[in-house]
Image (spheres, rainbow, N blue to C red):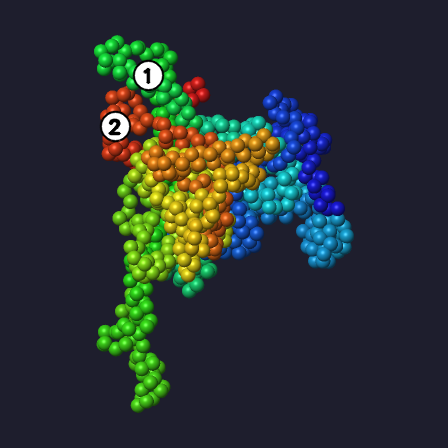
C-alpha cells in the first residue's frame, strides 16, 4: 500500500495532473513543466518544437554524462566507514589510492543525501522523529515497516503527526542539503539520488509551491524535473539557471551546470565561457582559503597532539578538506574545446582532394610553358574556409590538450622500483633467507640453529641478549629498497620524460632462463606501481591521445605518449570505492587506431597494452595480438591451431555478433536505430576483412589493423581477475568523433597553417615538433595563460575565432 502511494505521488508531477499549485503550467499530460521560477511562472509557454508525448518520462539528472564513472560500493558503504576510509586515504603516503578531493566530496554527498532522504520521508509520512523511532522499534517485519512509513499500524505509528508548517520546514532543509550535494559534484550527486528514495524527486517541487523564490529549491528541481527521455536539449530551458547565477554570482557550481547543459544544446562557445568564469571564481576562492593555512605540519607535532596512533585518530576539518571543483571544470572545459576541434574537421577536408588536383593541374601547365587556369572566386573562398577550419582544429585541440594536462597534474604516479633493483633485492633476500650470506665476522646468519646443535653449550644460551649486537650488524647488511620516485601524471606526457622513468612496454627477455629469473622480480616491481585514481582519469588519458592526433604530433612522439597512457591505464583502478567506468574516449581511440591503419605503429593491440599484470603464479598475459585469431580463440590452445571456418560460417558468426552487440548498445532505442547499428557493425566487419586481405597480399604499407574493440578476446583458460576494470565494457560502435579524427589522420595535410610558403617552411619534422612543444609549454605556464584562451574566443556568424 505504501509503495503504491509513493509511486502515485512520484508520477503526479510527470503526468501534469497536479492542480494544487498556482505555478503549474497547465501543459498536456506527458509534457514536462519548466521549474517555477517566480510568481509569474504560470504564463510560461512551452517551446513549439517540444514533443507533446513521450514513452518514458524521467528526471533530468538521469541524462547526465559520465554517470557510469561514479558507480561503486561507496553508495552502499555505511557513512561512518566511508568517512574513515576518506581520512585514511588522505593521510596515506603519496600517491594516494583515491583522489582525496573526490573522496571527501563523496562523503559529504552521501551524508547530505541520506539526511535529506530522512527528512523527506518524515515529511511525507507526517511523523515526528520520536514517533518514527518508536515505530521502528515497535515491531518487526511488515508491521514495523508500515509503522515507519506512518501508515498507522502498530507501535502508535499514527499518534504524533507533524503540522503543515513543520513539514514545509523539513522539506526546505532537505532541499538545502540536496543543493549542497549538487554543488559539490552534480554527477556523483545524481548517482546518489538515483539510489535513494523516490521521495526526493518531488521535495524541491513541493518547496517551490510555497516559496517560488527559494534558490536551493530551484537548483535541485532543475535536476529532478521530469522530462521525456533523450530529450534533454529540447526540454531544458536555461532560465532557471540564469536566475540562480544572477542571485549568486560568486558561485561556480551553477555556472558549471549551465555549461554542461549547453553541451547538450551544442552551444560549445558559451559553454567554454561559463566553465572559464567558474574556474576563475573557484581559483580565487581557493586562494583566499589557503592564505595563511598552507604551512606543513610535522609528523612529530601530529604525534604529540593526537598520540602515538595519530594516523588513526586525526580527522581533517571540513573547511580544510580539498575540493574537486577545479578538476571538474578543467576536465569539462577540455572536453568542450575537444568537441569544437572535431566539429571543424569535415569543413577543413571537404573539397580538399579536388583542390589539390586542380593545383597539380596548374603546376603541370606552368611546367609545360602554358598559361595556368586562374582560380575562381569560389575556389579562393573554399581554400580560405578550409584553411581557417584547419586552424580552428589545431587551436582548439591545443587548448583541450592544455586543460587535460592541467587536469592530470593534480594526480600522482609512481613506477615503484625498477625490475633490476627488485631482482637484486630478491636475490640477496633469498640468499640471506637460505643462510648463505654472512655477517661482518664471517659467520653464517643462521647461528641460532648452529648454537642449538652444540652439545657443549647450554641450550638456554642460544637466546641470551649478548647476541643482539650481532643481529643489528646482520640487519644492517640486508638489502634496502630505495624510496619510490613520485611523478605528476602530466610529467609522463611532457616533451622530455624524467630520466628515472622506466620504459614501457618492457623488453622481452632473450632466453627462457632470463625470463624465469626475472618473472618474480617483475611481479614484485609491478606490485609497487600505483596511481592516484580519479573516476574521469581513464577518459582524460585517451582524450589526450586523440588531441595529439588532431594537432598532428609526429607518430614517434605519439607512440611514446600512447605507451605512457597504457602504462597508467593498466594500474588505474578505484576498487573498492569505484567500479569500472565506461570510457567513450578509450573506445574512440581504439576505433581511430583501427580506421587509420595503426599509423603510430603499435606492436600489439591496445587491449594487451592496457591489460594489468597477472597475479603471481598465474602466468603472463598474451604478449601479442598475433597469438589470438580473428574469431577470438587462442591459436595455441591445446597445442594445435583451431579448425578454420568457412566464409559462410564467418559471415553468419559476424552477423550474429552484430545483432547481439546492437541489442546491448544503450543508444539503440527503436527499430530504426537497431537497423543502423547492425548495418554499421556489418560495414565495419567488411572493412576489417578487406584490410586483412590487403595485408595478406602485401599491398598495404601499414600493418593490418587490430581486432575491433567489440571482439571479446580472452586467453584459455581465463586468467583470474585482478582489477575492477576487467569488467568495463566499451562502447561497441564508432562515433562521429572517431570518424572525424580518423579522417583527419588519413587526409589532413601536415604543416603549419597559413600561406603556402609557411607550409613548406614548416614541413621539417624537427621544426614542426619544436614549434608545437613551445606553444604548449607557453600556454600552460600559468593561470593567466589558461584563462586567456577563452577571452580570445569571439562569436562571429556562429563560429569560434
Location of mark 2 (residue): 762
Q: Secondary structure at mark 2?
A: loop
Q: Position of residue 661 (x, y in %)?
A: 54, 40
Viewer-closest of 757 and 178 = 757
Rendered view: 566 above or below 35: below
Location of mark 1 (residue): 358
Identity of the residue drawn at 35% across and 61% down: 520
Q: Position of residue 78 (x, y in %)?
A: 56, 54
Rendered view: 481 above or below 771: below
- Looking at the rendered structure, which numbered label has been put on residue 175? none
Identity of the residue drawn at 35% across and 39% down: 703
Examine the image and state in which quarter residue 587 appears.
top left
Q: Nearer the viewer, mark 2 or mark 1?
A: 1
Identity of the residue drawn at 70% across and 43% down: 6
Rendered view: 405 above or below 45: below
Q: Position of residue 60 (x, y in %)?
A: 58, 35
Identity of the residue drawn at 60% across and 41% down: 175
Rendered view: 178 above or below 796: below
Q: Secondary structure at mark 1?
A: helix
Q: Quadrant of the C terminus?
A: top left
Q: How many badges with numbers are in the image?
A: 2
Camera sees residue 493: no
Q: CA gap, disc 2 to disc 1? A: 23 Å
Sequence-first tag of 2 and 1: 1
Camera sees residue 406: yes
Direction from residue 218 to residue 373 in the image, left or right: left
Q: Give the class, few, some or many, for how many residues have Cα within 10 Å of label 1's Cα (few <14, many ≥20).
A: some
Amino acid at each position: 500500500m505504501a509503495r503504491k502511494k509513493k509511486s502515485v505521488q512520484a508520477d503526479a508531477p510527470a503526468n501534469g495532473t497536479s492542480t494544487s499549485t498556482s505555478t503549474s503550467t497547465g501543459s498536456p499530460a506527458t509534457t514536462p513543466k519548466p521549474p517555477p521560477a517566480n510568481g509569474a511562472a504560470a504564463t510560461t509557454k512551452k517551446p513549439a518544437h517540444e514533443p507533446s508525448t513521450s514513452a518514458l518520462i524521467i528526471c533530468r539528472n538521469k541524462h547526465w554524462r559520465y554517470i557510469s564513472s561514479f558507480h561503486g560500493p561507496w553508495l552502499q558503504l555505511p557513512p561512518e566507514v566511508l568517512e574513515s576510509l576518506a581520512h585514511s586515504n588522505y593521510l596515506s603516503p603519496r600517491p594516494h589510492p583515491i583522489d582525496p578531493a573526490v573522496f571527501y566530496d563523496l562523503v559529504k554527498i552521501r551524508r547530505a543525501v541520506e539526511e535529506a532522504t530522512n527528512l523527506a520521508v518524515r515529511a511525507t509520512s507526517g511523523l515526528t522523529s520520536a514517533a518514527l523511532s518508536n515505530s521502528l522499534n515497535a515491531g518487526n517485519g511488515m508491521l514495523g515497516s508500515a509503522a515507519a512509513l506512518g501508515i498507522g499500524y502498530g507501535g502508535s505509528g499514527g499518534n504524533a503527526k507533524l503540522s503543515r508548517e513543520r513539514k514545509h520546514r523539513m522539506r526546505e532543509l532537505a532541499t538545502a542539503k540536496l543543493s549542497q550535494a549538487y554543488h559539490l559534484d552534480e554527477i556523483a550527486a545524481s548517482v546518489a539520488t538515483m539510489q535513494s528514495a523516490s521521495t526526493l524527486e518531488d521535495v524541491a517541487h513541493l518547496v517551490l509551491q510555497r516559496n517560488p523564490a527559494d534558490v536551493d529549491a530551484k537548483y535541485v528541481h532543475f535536476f529532478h524535473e521530469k522530462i521525456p527521455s533523450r530529450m534533454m536539449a529540447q526540454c531544458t530551458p536555461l532560465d532557471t539557471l540564469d536566475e540562480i547565477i544572477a542571485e549568486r554570482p560568486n558561485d561556480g557550481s551553477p555556472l558549471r551546470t549551465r555549461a554542461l547543459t549547453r553541451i547538450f544544446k551544442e552551444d560549445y562557445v558559451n559553454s567554454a565561457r561559463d566553465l572559464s568564469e567558474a574556474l576563475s571564481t573557484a581559483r580565487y576562492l581557493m586562494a583566499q582559503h589557503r592564505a595563511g593555512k598552507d604551512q606543513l605540519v610535522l609528523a612529530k607535532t601530529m604525534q604529540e597532539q593526537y598520540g602515538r596512533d595519530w594516523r588513526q585518530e586525526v580527522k581533517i576539518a571540513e573547511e580544510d578538506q580539498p575540493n574537486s571543483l577545479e578538476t571538474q571544470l578543467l576536465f569539462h572545459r577540455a572536453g568542450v574545446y575537444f568537441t569544437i576541434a572535431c566539429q571543424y574537421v569535415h569543413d577543413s577536408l571537404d573539397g580538399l582532394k579536388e583542390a589539390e588536383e586542380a593545383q597539380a593541374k596548374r603546376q603541370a601547365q606552368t611546367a609545360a610553358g602554358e598559361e595556368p587556369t586562374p582560380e575562381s572566386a569560389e575556389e579562393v573562398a573554399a581554400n580560405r574556409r578550409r584553411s581557417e577550419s584547419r586552424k580552428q582544429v589545431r587551436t582548439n585541440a591545443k587548448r583541450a590538450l592544455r586543460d587535460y594536462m592541467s587536469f592530470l597534474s593534480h594526480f600522482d604516479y609512481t613506477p615503484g622500483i625498477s625490475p633490476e633493483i627488485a631482482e637484486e633485492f630478491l636475490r640477496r633476500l633469498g640468499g640471506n633467507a637460505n643462510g648463505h650470506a654472512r655477517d661482518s665476522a664471517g659467520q653464517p646468519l643462521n647461528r641460532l640453529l648452529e648454537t642449538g646443535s652444540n652439545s657443549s653449550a647450554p641450550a638456554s644460551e642460544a637466546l641470551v641478549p649478548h647476541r643482539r649486537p650481532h643481529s643489528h650488524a646482520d640487519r644492517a647488511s640486508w638489502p634496502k629498497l630505495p624510496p619510490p620516485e613520485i611523478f605528476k601524471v602530466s610529467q609522463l606526457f611532457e616533451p622530455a620524460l624524467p630520466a628515472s622513468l622506466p620504459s614501457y612496454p618492457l623488453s622481452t627477455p632473450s632466453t627462457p632462463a632470463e625470463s624465469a629469473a626475472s618473472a618474480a622480480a617483475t611481479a614484485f616491481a609491478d606490485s609497487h606501481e600505483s596511481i592516484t585514481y580519479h573516476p574521469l582519469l581513464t577518459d582524460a588519458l585517451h582524450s589526450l591521445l586523440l588531441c595529439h592526433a588532431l594537432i598532428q604530433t609526429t607518430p614517434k612522439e605519439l607512440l611514446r605518449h600512447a605507451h605512457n597512457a597504457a602504462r597508467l591505464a593498466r594500474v588505474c583502478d578505484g576498487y573498492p570505492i569505484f567500479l569500472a567506468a565506461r570510457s567513450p574516449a578509450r573506445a574512440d581511440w581504439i576505433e581511430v587506431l583501427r580506421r587509420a591503419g595503426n599509423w603510430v605503429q603499435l606492436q600489439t593491440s591496445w587491449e594487451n597494452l592496457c591489460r594489468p599484470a597477472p597475479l603471481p603464479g598465474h602466468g603472463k598475459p598474451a604478449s601479442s595480438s598475433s597469438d589470438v585469431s580473428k574469431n577470438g580463440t587462442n591459436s595455441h590452445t591445446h597445442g594445435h591451431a583451431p579448425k578454420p571456418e568457412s566464409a559462410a560460417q564467418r559471415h553468419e558468426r559476424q552477423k550474429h555478433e552484430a545483432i547481439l552487440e546492437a541489442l546491448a548498445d544503450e543508444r539503440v532505442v527503436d527499430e530504426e536505430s537497431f537497423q543502423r547499428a547492425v548495418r554499421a557493425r556489418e560495414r565495419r566487419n567488411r572493412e576489417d576483412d578487406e584490410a586483412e586481405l590487403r595485408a595478406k597480399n602485401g599491398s598495404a604499407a601499414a600493418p593490418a589493423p587490430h581486432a575491433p574493440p567489440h571482439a571479446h578476446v580472452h586467453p584459455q583458460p581465463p586468467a583470474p581477475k585482478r582489477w575492477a576494470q576487467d569488467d568495463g565494457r566499451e562502447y561497441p560502435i564508432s562515433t562521429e568523433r572517431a570518424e572525424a579524427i580518423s579522417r583527419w589522420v588519413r587526409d589532413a595535410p601536415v604543416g603549419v597553417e597559413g600561406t603556402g610558403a609557411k607550409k613548406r617552411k614548416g614541413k621539417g619534422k624537427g621544426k614542426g615538433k619544436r614549434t608545437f612543444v613551445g606553444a604548449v609549454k607557453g600556454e600552460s605556464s600559468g593561470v593567466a595563460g589558461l584563462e586567456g584562451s577563452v577571452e580570445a574566443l569571439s562569436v562571429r556568424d556562429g563560429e569560434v575565432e
